[in-house]
């Protein structure tokens, strides 16, 4: 049985990736012509363009899903208004620190800071002022941490 084959190079149009591609046609019939019909090439190029559009759309959708997942993870562990880590985040980090402390046989201290009059401040001036106060207190603790070497503590600014 005699087999013939023909390789057709597919050329990319402007704005489309110029990855080299070819289509191999194998047939047991004798070759009819040395060049394929132009309508066949046009049809193949149209189909290839459709596949490329579908791949581009899939990439966009995947990136969108990944971005939404990242945002959901952040919101699960941070306050929506202040973007400061929440109690769940603190507990996760505390568990990690305790596990590390037990493995490394190092000491661990937890500082509990209570802002006097914070509830009244929120009630009188609004939650946006309370949120701003928490952010300023966090910034002050971070500055103090940088001034003292050898000490580490959980802070919303260095938590992520």
Image (spheres, rainbow, N blue to C red):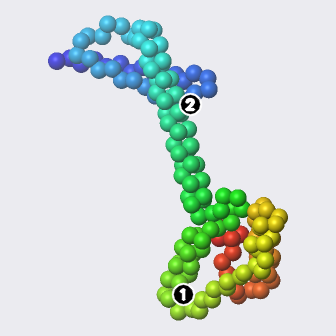
Does residue 20 appear in this view? no
* Nearer the observer, 6 or 130: 130
Tell me the CA gap for discs 2 and 1. 53 Å
Seen at 44% across and 14% down, the residue is 43
* Nearer the observer, 90 or 35: 90
Disc sitting over residue 17 in the figure: 2
Judged from the image, the secondary structure of the residue bearing numbered disc 2 is: loop
Kindly indicate the quadrant of the structure image that contains residue 93: bottom right
Seen at 33% across and 20% down, the residue is 25
Q: Are marks 2 and 1 in contact (CB under 8 Å)?
A: no
Does residue 110 appear in this view? yes
Q: Quadrant of the C terminus?
A: bottom right
* Nearer the observer, 92 or 46: 92
- Report the mark closest to the observer, 2 or 1: 1
Q: Which residue is mark 1?
A: 101
> Quick one: label 2, few (<14), some, or many (20+) residues within 10 Å?
few
> Quick one: label 1, few (<14), some, or many (20+) residues within 10 Å?
few
Seen at 53% across and 33% down, the residue is 57
The vertical placement of 77 against 32, above or below, is: below
Residue 125's spot in the image, x, y percent? 83, 64
**As drawn, which residue projects farthest toward the left?**
1
Residue 110's spot in the image, x, y percent? 63, 86
């Amino acid at each position: 049985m005699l087999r013939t084959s023909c390789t057709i190079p597919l050329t990319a149009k402007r704005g489309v990736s110029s990855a080299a591609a070819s289509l191999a046609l194998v047939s047991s019939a004798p070759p009819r012509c040395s060049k394929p019909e132009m309508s066949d090439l046009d049809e193949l190029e149209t189909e290839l363009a459709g596949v490329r559009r579908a791949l581009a759309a899939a990439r966009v959708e995947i990136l969108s899903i990944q971005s939404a997942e990242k945002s959901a993870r952040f919101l699960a562990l941070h306050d929506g208004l202040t973007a400061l880590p929440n109690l769940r985040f603190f507990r996760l980090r505390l568990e990690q620190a305790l596990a590390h402390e037990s493995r490394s046989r190092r000491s661990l201290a937890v500082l509990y800071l209570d802002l006097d009059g914070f509830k009244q401040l929120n009630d009188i001036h609004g939650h946006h002022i309370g949120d701003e106060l928490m952010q300023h207190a966090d910034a002050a603790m971070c500055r103090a941490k940088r001034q003292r070497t050898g000490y580490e503590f959980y802070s919303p600014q260095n938590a992520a």
